[in-house]
Structures are given as C-alpha cells and as structure tokens.
Amino acid sequence: MTPEFRADLLLAVDQQLLSPETPYVAKTYQRLLALGLDEAAAKYQIVYCLCEEMEQILKTHRSFSEKSYRAALKNLPIALDIENEENENQV
C-alpha cells in the first residue's frame, strides 16, 4: 500500500469513526484501544481491513460489501509489519 493510498484510507476511516452510519467501525476502534493498541495502530488495523475490501472490489468487480468489511473488523487485531511494508514501498 503506497503512503498516498494509506493516507486516503486513513481519511476514510476517520470519517467512518464519526459517521452514525458506521458505528461498528467506532466500536472496533474502541475495542482495539481497550486491548492496548495506541490510536495510530488501532486506526491502521482498520485501514488494513478497508484496503483488503477495496482490493476485493477491484479483483472481483463487485460493490462494497459491508458484511465482508464487518467480518474483517471482527477478526482484528492481526499481526501487521508496518515497518517492512513501508520499506517495500520505498524500493
């Protein structure tokens, strides 16, 4: 994921955290914070799920699946190696 794309998805997640239409995102965020993740790590976990959903949309030419996105959020936290991903994007 490029830094620019990550920034766009982070903006989308920030909007979802405030939206009354996506309370499940805020609930996931609060759950991740309660598990000890800091704010940035918790948001990045959600960004990762949104990115995965976007990739499926592009691969399968389907519309956004709230059901799939919610299922991914329920599986958080997951192990993410942000540092390695950032290094791979710089090559």
Image: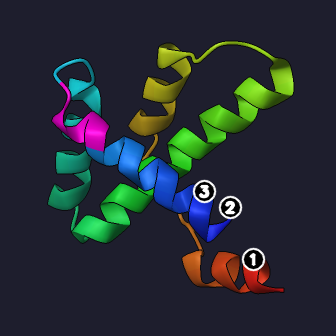
Residue at image point 78% right, 29% down: 58
Tell me if residue 3 comes above or below residue 48 in the rendering: below
Q: Which residue is mark 2?
A: 1
| Labels 1 and 2 touching (C-beta < 8 A) | yes
Q: Is residue 50 above or below residue 11?
A: above
Using the numbered discs, state the Cα–Cα distance from disc 1 to disc 2 in whole angstroms: 7 Å
Disc on the earlier residue, 1 or 3: 3
Separation of marks 1 and 3 at Cα, in angstroms: 11 Å
Q: Quadrant of the C terminus?
A: bottom right
Tell me where the magenta segment starts and ends, as one range.
15-19
**81 sits left or right of 43 in the view:** right
Quadrant of the rendered structure where residue 32 is?
bottom left
The residue carrying mark 3 is: 5
N-term mark: 1 or 2: 2
Q: Residue at x 78, y 80 (%)?
A: 88
Q: Nearer the viewer, residue 78 or 24?
A: 24
Q: Residues within 10 Å of mark 2 (few under 14, many from 20)?
A: few
Q: Which mark is residue 89?
A: 1
Horizontal placement of 69 versus 43: left or right?
right
Badge 3: few (under 14), some or many (20 or more) residues near its Cα, within 10 Å?
A: few
Amino acid beneath label 3: Phe
Label 1 element class: helix
Res. 83 image quadrant: bottom right
Dot 3 falls on a residue whose secondary structure is helix
Residue 28 horizontal/vertical position (percent)? 27, 41
Spatial distance from mark 2 to mark 3, Cα to Cα? 6 Å
Foreground residue, 23 or 76? 23
| Majority secondary structure of magenta residues | helix
What residue is drawn where x is 36% and y is 68%? 41
Find out whether the residues at labels 2 and 3 contact each other: C-beta distance under 8 Å. yes
